[in-house]
Image: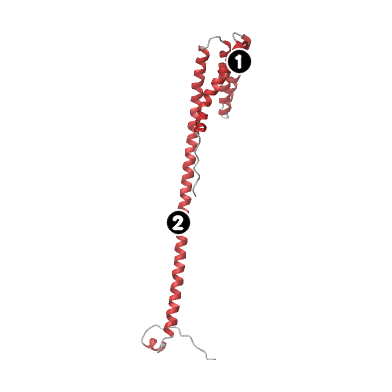
């Protein structure tokens, strides 16, 4: 059975690749807007972001420890900690080079983590495709064998039926020949043939 061929638009393939840069850029832009609206050199605002960053990092560390750790939740916690730290520094400082440096580091780290996820997802997709292909080929082989077996059975039955029909026609034709005598054939040493007794009405 033919499967439909689906083509993904190039934007669908490109969208996941720009998400990490888009996320860190959004944080940087919002932090600079906050900086222009009173957060520059504000100890209180910087303290709030620092407390949030430390709390998120502590939560991520707690979730990552132990045998029953939650990797996804831990990753979310560490990501939130980095986001709060970047936003706090970018909002507090007046110069732009330090926020840009932190944005660059955060973007690189985001792509490193995203690449690991993309690689695992690609491996899982490849393994699934291979298993599906193997299962489809196995089923196709079984179907082919069953079709051949069914055709052979039909041909055998048809050949047997044709042979029986031909044999019956030959016996009937021989019995109607003039001078046919089954007793003479038996006396000559030939195998005895069944004789149909005719009952006169």
Mark closest to the chain's N terminus, 1 or 2 = 1
From this viewpoint, which residue is outermost toward the bottom? 200
Q: CA distance from mark 1 to mark 2?
A: 69 Å
Rendered image quadrant of residue 171? bottom left
Residue occupying image coordinates x 61% and y 18%:
55
Marks 1 and 2: CB-CB under 8 Å?
no
The foreground one among 38 and 48 is 38
Q: Which label was assigned to residue 145?
A: 2
Residue occupying image coordinates x 47% and y 53%:
142
Q: Secondary structure at mark 1?
A: helix
The foreground one among 67 and 142 is 142
Residue 15 at x, y = what percent?
Answer: 52, 29
Say whether residue 126 is left or right of residue 44: left
Q: Is residue 142 above or below residue 45?
A: below
Q: Secondary structure at mark 2?
A: helix
Q: Is residue 83 above or below residue 146?
A: above
Query: Which residue lies under the disc numbered 1?
Result: 49
Residue 160 at x, y = what percent?
Answer: 45, 71
Residue 168 at x, y = what percent?
Answer: 45, 78
Label 2 Cα neighbours within 10 Å, binned few <14 / some 14-19 / many ≥20: few
Residue 118 at x, y = what percent?
Answer: 49, 31
Quarter placement of the C terminus: bottom right
| Camera sees residue 166 | yes
């Amino acid at each position: 059975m033919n499967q439909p061929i689906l083509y993904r638009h190039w934007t669908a393939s490109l969208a996941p690749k720009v998400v990490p840069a888009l996320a860190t850029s959004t944080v940087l832009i919002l932090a600079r807007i906050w900086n222009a609206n009173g957060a520059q050199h504000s100890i209180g605002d910087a303290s709030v972001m620092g407390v949030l960053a430390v709390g998120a990092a502590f939560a991520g560390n707690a979730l990552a420890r132990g045998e029953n750790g939650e990797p996804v939740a831990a990753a979310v916690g560490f990501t939130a900690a980095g986001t709060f730290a970047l936003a706090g520094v970018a909002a507090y400082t007046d110069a732009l080079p330090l926020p840009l440096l932190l944005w660059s580091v955060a973007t690189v780290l985001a792509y490193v983590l995203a690449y690991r996820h993309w690689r695992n997802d690609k491996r899982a997709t490849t393994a699934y495709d291979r298993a599906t292909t193997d299962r489809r080929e196995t089923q196709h082989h079984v179907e082919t064998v069953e079709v051949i077996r069914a055709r052979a059975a039909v041909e055998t039955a048809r050949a047997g039926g044709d042979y029986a029909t031909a044999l019956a026609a030959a016996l009937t034709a021989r019995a109607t020949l003039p001078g046919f005598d089954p007793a003479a054939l038996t006396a000559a040493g030939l195998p005895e043939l069944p004789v149909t007794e005719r009952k006169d009405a």
